[in-house]
Image: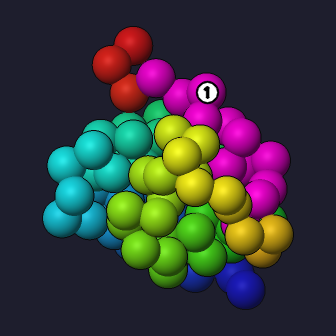
Amino acid sequence: MTETDMQTRRKRLVYRANYRGFKEADMILGGFAKAHMETMTDAEVIMFEDLLGAKDHDIYAWIMETLPVPANYDTPLLERLRTFNPIA
């Protein structure tokens, strides 16, 4: 994948993270994407893209630790999301 392709992918993910349709998820995922997308490794970008494929309410429950996290989503990236404060 070229650098231009990865930049386009990053921009699309920031957009997807901000317009999920579930306000709490929009705030956390969108805020996290805006704050960290440019410094994420390519592997983290792929993990984030994979995470965005899950249902909003599931992602929110995993972040809030009210549902167990499936192994494929239990990544260091999810841990970073748990500690992210969208209001700060």
Q: Main secondary structure of the magenta part?
A: helix
Q: Is residue 14 above or below residue 80?
A: below
Q: Extreme top residue here?
A: 88
Q: Amino acid at mark 1?
A: Thr
Q: Is residue 83 magenta?
A: yes
Q: Secondary structure at mark 1?
A: helix
Mark 1 Cα-neighbour bin, 10 Å: few <14, some 14–19, many ≥20: few
Q: Is residue 7 left or right of residue 26?
A: right
| Residue positioned 81% across, 69% down in the render | 71
Residue 76 lies, with reference to residue 4, above or below; the image says above
Which residue corresponds to the image point at 58% horizontal and 55% vertical from the top-left? 67
Q: Quadrant of the C terminus?
A: top left
What residue is disc 1 on? 83
- Percent of width and height locating residue 73: 71, 66
The reply to whether the magenta stretch includes residue 14 is no
Q: Position of residue 79 (x, y in %)?
A: 71, 40
Q: Horizontal and vertical percent for residue 53? A: 50, 80
> Which quadrant of the structure image shows residue 1?
bottom right
Q: Residue furthest bottom?
A: 1
Residue drawn at (41%, 74%), measured in percent from left and top?
Answer: 55
- Identify the residue at image location x=71%, y=49%: 77
Location of residue 23 with respect to 10 vertically, above or below: above
Asked whether residue 63 is in view, the answer is no
Relative horizontal placement of residue 43, taking residue 39 as reference (left or right): right
Q: How many marks?
A: 1
Q: Which residues are magenta?
A: 73-85
Colour scheme used in the picture? rainbow
In the image, 13 versus 64, the foreground residue is: 64
